[in-house]
């Protein structure tokens, strides 16, 4: 596995592959890799002859008082895992390399509407930071494919929009969410949870899964289901940022005709913010 610490090194390696006719798939991450990340690398492998993974904890997507400083950094272990799943190149840019004028002074990418919705309401500037860094990384790597997790569903939709709006010749691929046997979605932030909280955190998925089943079985309407889910999450000890139903794939408000929907939730458990989602397929139109 090649390791590139600068943009120039990365470009030299990718250019050499291109001359040999290789295709390139790219998996951007913030490190502290778990089986969810590795499943994206495996998915990338199935699409292209070369796989590039980046590890970069992007200061621009963290708000003041968020966990940028304490975000888990486990480079040696990450490197070992990436090698084991057949990564061709690990890109480890420095903050000063990606933001030579400083993160706050950089030119940025704004995806209107979507960036202020859902998590954007609670994390102002977060999606500007995400869109900007992913745009920069795509401009550096020039992949044929970028592989992102459905775990961060709003991020996936946002990057699809950016790639389309900016005419980037890249196919965006979404990989399914990997979970613990309890149902808890794997996440680097799970390491903030105490053992007790971790057990409790699985209630989030159980709750949205029940909500999904009830909507598929049309036990109740969407607004009622959202209200019930919020109440049961609060009763279970979570502080709810939102639990809501939107339509796939654009996250607009659902209409009664929409068949492909998704439940999206963001909650706090103690000091840890958890997000998760569950898709819903309705066979026939139903009441919104
Ligand atoms: P992060 O390191 O949190 O920025 O995540 C890097 C990529 O891994 C993103 O595209 C995430 O959506 C994806 N990812 C995170 N958790 C999971 C998971 N449990 N299953 C699949 N993909 C995931």
Image (cartoon, grey):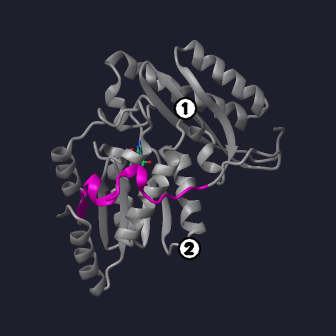
Residue 4 % position (x, y): 20, 64
Is residue 192 shown to the viewer in this render?
yes
- Determine if the C-beta at disc 2 is less than 8 A from ligand 1: no
Residue bearing the label numbered 1:
266
Q: Nearer the viewer, residue 13 or 112?
A: 112
Q: Residue at x 42, y 54 (%)?
A: 105
* Segment tinted magenta in the rendering: 89-111
Question: Taking 106 as reference, is 93 left or right?
Answer: left
Q: Nearer the viewer, residue 204 or 29?
A: 29
Q: 179 above or below 249? A: above
Q: 193 above or below 41? A: above
* Label whose residue precedes the other's in the sequence (2 or 1): 2
Residue 24 % position (x, y): 35, 72
Residue 46 % position (x, y): 37, 66
Please, what secondary structure does the residue beneath circle 1 have? strand
Is residue 149 shown to the viewer in this render?
no
Please, what secondary structure does the residue beneath circle 2 have? loop
Mark 1 Cα shell of 10 Å, populated few (<14), some (14-19), many (≥20): many
Q: Residue at x 83, y 45 (%)?
A: 256
Q: Residue at x 71, y 23 (%)?
A: 227
Image quadrant in which you'd find residue 82: bottom left
Q: Quadrant of the N terminus?
A: bottom left
Q: Residue at x 71, y 38 (%)?
A: 216
Question: Taking 176 as reference, is 190 left or right?
Answer: left
Residue bearing the label numbered 2:
167
Give me the disc on residue 33.
Answer: none
Image quadrant in which you'd find residue 183: top left
Mark 2 Cα shell of 10 Å, populated few (<14), some (14-19), many (≥20): few
């Amino acid at each position: 596995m090649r390791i590139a610490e600068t943009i120039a090194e990365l470009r030299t390696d990718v250019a050499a592959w291109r001359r040999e006719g290789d295709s390139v798939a790219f998996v951007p991450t913030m490190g502290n890799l778990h089986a969810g990340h590795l499943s994206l690398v495996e998915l990338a492998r199935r699409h292209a002859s070369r796989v590039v993974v980046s590890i970069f904890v992007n200061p621009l997507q963290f708000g003041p008082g968020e966990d940028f400083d304490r975000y888990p950094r486990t480079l040696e272990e990450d490197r070992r895992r990436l090698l084991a799943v057949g990564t061709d190149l690990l890109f480890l840019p420095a903050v000063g390399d990606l933001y030579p004028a400083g993160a706050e002074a950089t030119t940025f990418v704004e995806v209107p509407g979507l960036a202020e919705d859902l998590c954007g309401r609670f994390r102002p500037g977060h999606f500007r930071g995400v869109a900007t860094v992913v745009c920069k990384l795509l401009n550096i790597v020039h992949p044929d494919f970028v592989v992102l997790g459905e775990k961060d569903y709003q991020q996936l939709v946002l990057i699809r929009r950016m790639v389309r709006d900016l005419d980037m010749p890249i196919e965006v691929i979404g990989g399914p969410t990997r979970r613990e046997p309890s149902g808890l979605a794997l996440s680097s932030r799970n390491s903030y949870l105490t053992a007790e909280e971790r057990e409790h955190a699985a209630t989030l998925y159980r709750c949205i899964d029940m909500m999904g089943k009830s909507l598929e079985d049309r036990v109740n309407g969407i607004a009622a289901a959202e209200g019930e889910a919020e109440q049961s999450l609060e009763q279970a000890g979570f502080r709810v940022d939102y639990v809501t139903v939107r339509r796939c794939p654009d996250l607009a408000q659902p209409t009664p005709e929409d068949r492909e929907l998704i439940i999206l939730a963001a909650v706090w458990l103690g000091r840890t913010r958890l997000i998760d989602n569950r898709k819903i397929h309705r066979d026939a139109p139903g009441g919104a």
